[in-house]
């Protein structure tokens, strides 16, 4: 089926292949699981430095 996950294969890869417990497997984000399975470059979409730079450029304005 197009557009669906093969949950059996993902669970097999995560729990059998990587040795993850079910709780750890289900707590992962899709990006984390993909990284653990060797896909992607491991970079976060936005790291702490980028978040701090963004916050400095657009500070919250106090008050209600």
Image: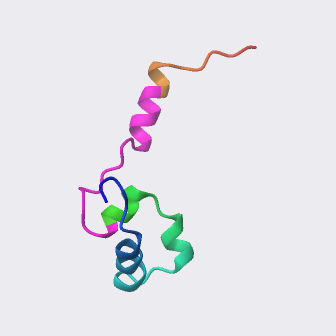
Q: How is the image coloured?
A: rainbow
| The quadrant where residue 34 appears | bottom left
Residue 47 lies in magenta, yes or no? yes
What number of labels is visible?
A: 0
Residue 54: give x, y in percent of width and height: 43, 27
User: Is residue 30 found left or right of 38 in the rendered image?
Assistant: right
Residue 43: give x, y in percent of width and height: 30, 51
**Quarter of the image with the C terminus in it:** top right
Residue segment shown in magenta: 36-54
Camera-side residue of 11 and 28: 11
| Point 39% across, 41% down: residue | 46
| The quadrant where residue 13 appears | bottom left
Residue 25 lies in magenta, yes or no? no
| Point 45% across, 58% down: residue | 29
Residue 28, relative to residue 57: is it above or below? below
Camera-side residue of 59 and 10: 10
| Point 44% across, 20% down: residue | 57
Camera-side residue of 41 and 26: 26
| The quadrant where residue 62 appears | top right
| Point 42% across, 75% down: residue | 11
């Amino acid at each position: 089926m197009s557009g669906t996950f093969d949950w059996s294969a993902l669970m097999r890869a995560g729990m059998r292949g990587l040795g993850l417990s079910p709780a750890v497997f289900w707590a992962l984000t899709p990006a984390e699981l993909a990284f653990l399975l060797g896909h992607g470059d491991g970079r976060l979409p936005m790291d702490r430095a980028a978040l701090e730079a963004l916050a400095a450029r657009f500070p919250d304005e106090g008050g209600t």
